[in-house]
Image (cartoon, rainbow, N blue to C red):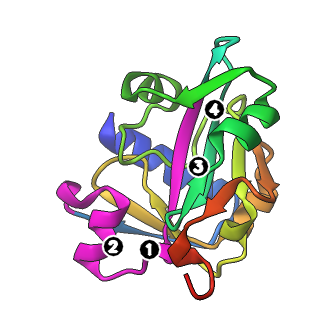
Amino acid sequence: MENDSAEQVQAALAALNATFRVVEIDPAFTHTAAYCAHYGYAMDQSANAILVASKRPKGRNAVCVVLATTRLDVNRRVRSLLGVKKLSFASAELAAELTGMETGGVTPFGLPDELPVYVDSRVVAREEILVGGGNRSTKIFVDPEVFHRMESAQVIEGLAFGLPSDTPGG
């Protein structure tokens, strides 16, 4: 599954005519903070793809893309976008079932068309972002303008909260 999902992600990016590059990584450093510390990248260059799943009603899911220096507004913004009463982060099992990708490698690319992708507006303001590569041994640097060409993606203002280190003087 690991190589297939990475190939699927790269094929999806190529089909979108995205500007991207793939880097091989040690799977021990797949999580954003570990990757950035080990390989020398700033956290604000990285974006996390977070799968959320509704509890009431069940079965409404979305992938949310936020900068690693922000926190996803699950309880208000995402819950409102999905029109649900109760929402949480998806389990690793559900993430694998819905995306075909392992935790640590989930990315907004190469997903089923019916799975909405919500992208915080701060992500598309960057020249390049780092995201998961579809598995735990690759990362992808991509021009975030690609989100404007994805049918399943919607750029959302205020999808995430800035953390103290993300604000001037913070």
Q: Say which mark, if any, is on residue 36.
A: 2
Q: Nearer the viewer, mark 2 or mark 4?
A: 2
Q: Say which mark, if any, is on residue 109.
A: 3
Residue at 44%, 74% (x, y): give it. Answer: 43
Does dot 1 land on a helix, a strand or a loop? helix
Q: Position of residue 14 (x, y in %)?
A: 61, 59
Front residue of 169/154: it is 169
Q: CA distance from mark 2 to mark 3?
A: 21 Å
**Mark 2 and mark 3 residues within 8 Å of each other at the beta carbon:** no
Does dot 3 land on a helix, a strand or a loop? loop
**Mark 2 and mark 1 residues within 8 Å of each other at the beta carbon:** yes
Q: Earlier in the sequence, mark 2 or mark 3?
A: 2
**Mark 2 and mark 4 residues within 8 Å of each other at the beta carbon:** no
Kind of residue sitting beneath label 3: Phe
Callout 2: few (<14), some (14-19), or many (20+) C-alpha neighbours within 10 Å? Answer: some
In the picture, measured across the screen, residue 31 lies left or right of residue 127, that is left
Does dot 4 land on a helix, a strand or a loop? loop
Query: What residue span does the magenta drawing correspond to?
Result: 26-52
